Image (cartoon, rainbow, N blue to C red):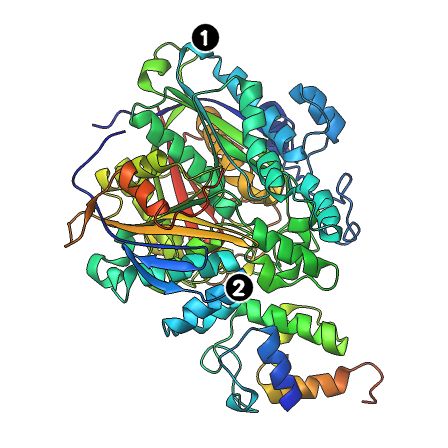
Amino acid sequence: MKNDPKTYITAYCSISGGKVYKDDKLIFKEDTPDETADFLLSVYKSFSIDYPKFYKMDNLSKLGFLAAELLLGGRQIAEEYGPERIGVVFSNASSSLDADLKYFETVKNIPSPALFVYTLPNIVIGEVSIRHRCKGENGFFIRDRFDTDWMQFYVQDLFDRGRVESCICGWVECLEAHYHAAVYLVESCPGEKALPFNSKHIHQIYETDNGEING
Amino acid sequence: MRSPVFIAGAGIISAIGNDIAGNLAALESEAAGMGEMQFLRSVHRHKLPVAEVKMNNAALAERAGMSADIGRAALLSAVAAKEALRNAAIDNLSTWRTGFISANTIGGMDKTEDFFKDFLHHPHQGRLRNLVHHECGAVTELVADQLGIKNYISTISTACSSSANAIFFAARLIRQGMLDIVVAGGTDALTRFTLNGFNTLMIVDQQFCQPFDENRRGLNLGEGAGYIVLVSEKVARTLLHQPVCTLSGYCNANDAYHQTASSPDGTGSYLAMKGALEQSGLRPGDIDYINLHGTGTNNNDIAEGTAIKMLFEGYYPPMSSTKSFTGHTLGASGGIEAVFAMLSIQHGLIYPNLRLETPMKELPFMPEKQFRKGVPVRHVLSNSFGFGGNCSSLIFSKI
Amino acid sequence: MADLKQQIIAQLSLKDLKPEDIGDDQPLFVEGLGLDSIDALELIVLLQQVYKIKLANAEEGQHVFRSVRTMAQYIMEHQPGTAS
């Protein structure tokens, strides 16, 4: 794979196994193992995030939303770059199966429109885009495991072709008790702690917490 | 100059025909594909018309050369993708680097529905992960095996714009020199899951849909598959038949407004169309036909119409929603409509927007009402917009 | 109406709100509580589930769901077994 030094990972966030890391620091750890929904809610509360729509999201969207929220840490990237210059590219293995199952349970009674809305994996991209006003290119790839070479190639190409100037990317996987987000921000100007944007660093972020490797 | 990506062939199966010839005949005779469901079992049978492919799974399996135990979406996919490769007539496919990029929104949901029932009764059988691999990803992989494509296989799921996205990813891989030939598009089969879901959103029309009509009531769900064969310049030179067109522009943008609803001014649609025009180096006035996303829902048509009004002010090209024939085939729609775009250029066709009675009062233009042929069509714009705010536009240009 | 408010909060996952935060005549959509089209559909489910009232289409909902008061009135008038 091509290794273009003009792009950098300027921040990253990973959430899995009851822990949240921002860059290389552990910023949240649950005391006792919780249900996925309860854990995500405690993360939301502990960082005093004020976004009532959070409660309506399915677990996959909550996970992606929190990862993006903590990743950006209050940065208004839409103002820095312009909404059309920010892309969002995610990947996972289980698509929206977590929401599909929950929706299916309601079908026995009266199907819930609010749950049906989340039975597509890319709704998490929609939620992140609405929150941070990202209107650039977005893509969602379903893979058995996190294909870091592909993600590097795909996002680098968006930069090379001038399609985006900033991109929120990564792995956002959620199925019942298992959840794992490894999300990072790619930009073309190096910040203080920026890592060159390459497959090796993406893999490191994915492994930050020694989370279970999907596959 | 960027090197162009050529469209060497196409394949399609939809409610109006089982191949290109069948679809062309139905478009010309203005025969819509909706009706009372024959194959899907649902409580909505007598209430909600659907646009089903007129073959049962056994017949599809025979045509695809696959087992009838495989989900319907995979069977539809194989039928259309095989036609696409035959249509492209590439010699020695195996000597090139080939890819298959297919979109679907439901995976093997028709099979999955049965699984869910078992699973909800015995949630600890531990087959859930198998299900994902076996059903969702498998749709693409099973078909790639059938086609003899090995180098690159990918599944894309960005709702109703999925297969348009599959097509431009394919173009990128060819431009990057990573692959020589890619079969790209999408497939989706009708399922109770999607029918019930769209019905709870109250956007399913109980009559035949009327896209871009003032009195539109919603969409009809459909099923099918559509693929085009994208090739590099090097491959194009070896082809028996001259390719019909190139993919000259594409753009994807996010509406960033609501999970399912489009913004009132169609920001995402506008950005996608504008971006595709810029990439192709064309002006709005160069477009000879727009294949609308045109689902027939109140929200889509006004958002898309408003975006077109803004971008095409002063010159409104002929346009229509072929979903008035095929229903909304979700993950397959971008692929099916890309095939229609290619055929439009190849045969000089403008398709009608069926059942249009009263033009929308907010719009200064109205879609085509009659089938026309022998029209010089050089550039076609095809729109595909999906839930999650995902908006894509493709431009096909005559060679 | 307090019960209805509690049901609305539960159905729509408005976890930051308490029943007393919703005014009887406060508009539920847009400038009021800020509910959206999916919330409207969930309110239709609520009517069906709790009150066995079936709304024919989303347009009817626009009038019914103007405020908690209009919703309560509609329920009074349409509940099966209630004299009207």
Residue A145 image position (x, y, % from top left): 45, 38
Residue under the image location 55 percent in, 55 percent down: A177
Looking at the image, which is closer to me, B130 or B67? Answer: B130
SS of the residue at dot 2?
loop
Examine the rendering and report whether any part of residue B198 can be seen. Answer: no
Examine the rendering and report whether any part of residue B53 can be seen. Answer: yes
Q: Is residue B250 left or right of residue B17?
A: left
Return the residue at label 1.
B92
Return the residue at label 2.
A34
Residue under the image location 74 percent in, 87 percent down: C76
Residue A194 image position (x, y, % from top left): 18, 50
- Please say if B13 is above or below B243: below
Q: Chain of mark 2?
A: A
Q: Residues within 10 Å of mark 2 (few under 14, many from 20)?
A: some
Q: Is residue C49 left or right of residue B256?
A: right
Amino acid type, mark 1: Asn
